[in-house]
Image (spheres, rainbow, N blue to C red):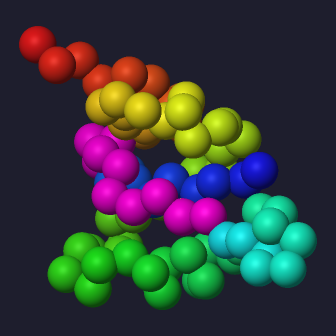
């Protein structure tokens, strides 16, 4: 089930998580960058944002996460 994380490419902060469902089948559908960005807060500078597609269960996304801007990998953010 693809989920899309919109993150700030300078610091890796995730600002939006997006998932699209087919209401009839209940399956998760793909989405384009433009479709995803329509749901992002207008106050954010969209030119600083990037989209990362991830294949994770919702439970795996629990906790404080960020995207490493250099590797584009999802990682747990230090809370120290």
Q: Position of residue 59 (x, y in %)?
A: 54, 33
Drawn side of residue 33 relative to residue 15, left or right = right
**Span of residues in magenta:** 10-19
Q: Residue at x 61, y 64 (%)?
A: 19
Position of 63 with respect to 30 (left or right) is left
Q: Position of residue 50 (x, y in %)?
A: 48, 60
Find residue 75 and report its image quarter. Answer: top left
Q: Is residue 58 left or right of residue 44?
A: right
Q: Which residue: 57% across, 41% down?
A: 58
Q: Residue visible at 48% across and 86% down?
A: 38
Q: Nearer the viewer, residue 42 or 64?
A: 64
Q: Nearer the viewer, residue 2 or 7?
A: 2
In this picture, is 5 found above or below 47? above
The quarter of the displayed image where residue 43 is located: bottom left
Which residue of the protein is positioned furthest toward the right in this rendering? 25
Up-down: is 54 above or below 3?
above
Count every numbered label the image shows and give the total. 0
- Extreme residue toward the top, this view: 80
Q: Is there any visible trace of residue 27 in the rendered image?
A: yes
> Which quadrant of the figure contains the C terminus?
top left
Query: Residue 44 falls in which quadrant of the image?
Result: bottom left
Q: Check if residue 61 falls in the magenta segment.
A: no
Q: Is residue 14 above or below residue 33?
A: above
Where is residue 42? Give x, y as percent.
27, 85
Query: Looking at the image, can residue 29 be seen?
Result: no
Q: Residue furthest left?
A: 80
Task: From the top left corner, tell me how far across and down residue 49 is, in percent.
Answer: 39, 63
Residue at 56% across, 75% down: 36
């Amino acid at each position: 089930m693809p989920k899309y994380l919109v993150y700030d490419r300078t610091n890796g902060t995730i600002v939006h998580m997006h998932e699209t469902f087919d209401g009839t089948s209940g399956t998760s559908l793909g989405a384009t960058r433009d479709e995803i960005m329509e749901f992002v807060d207008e106050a954010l500078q969209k030119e600083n944002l990037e989209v990362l597609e991830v294949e994770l269960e919702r439970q795996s996304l629990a906790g404080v996460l960020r995207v490493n801007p250099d590797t584009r990998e999802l990682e747990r953010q230090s809370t120290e």
